[in-house]
Amino acid sequence: MAEELIGTVTHYFGRPGVGVVQLTGSIKAGDHIRITGHTTHFEQVVTSMEVEHGKIESAVAGDEIAIKVDHQVREHDQVFLITED
């Protein structure tokens, strides 16, 4: 499996369990991602993404998006897209 760095976490909202990610690559609903940092390390499938409180299906480099996350994330955590290459 291959991994590509696609973004960095800029904020985390604990109550809804949402991480804000500044993208340097592309992402779409259904993608398999890994989020890693000093104390963070987990994989998940992207089930929900939003921009300005509106649901989206995909996003590209330069976008800042909110992703529903399975676990707490922290500022500066890195987001990797996992592919089966």
Image: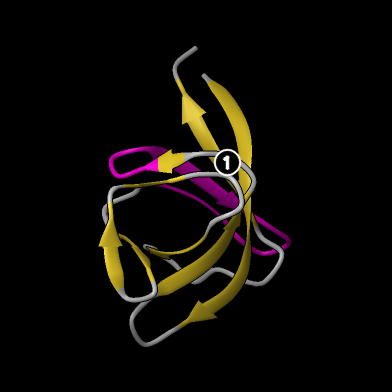
| Residue in the image at 50% along x and 39% along y | 26
* Image spot of residue 42 (x, y percent): 50, 51
Q: Is residue 22 left or right of residue 53?
A: right
Badge 1 marks a residue whose secondary structure is strand
Asked if residue 62 lies in the magenta stretch, the reply is: no
Q: Residue at x 46, y 42 (%)?
A: 33
Q: Is residue 38 left or right of residue 4?
A: right
Residue 47 appears at what percent x and percent y? 26, 53
At 26% from the left and 63% from the top, the residue drawn is 55
Q: Which residues are magenta?
A: 28-44
Mark 1 is on which residue type? Phe
Give the crowd class for mark 1: few <14, some 14-19, many >=20 residues within 10 Å: many
Q: Quadrant of residue 24?
A: top right
Magenta stretch contains residue 37: yes
The residue identified by callout 1 is: 80
The residue furthest bottom is 15
Residue 27 position, x and y percent, is: 44, 41
Give whichever of 81, 52 is nearer the camera.
52
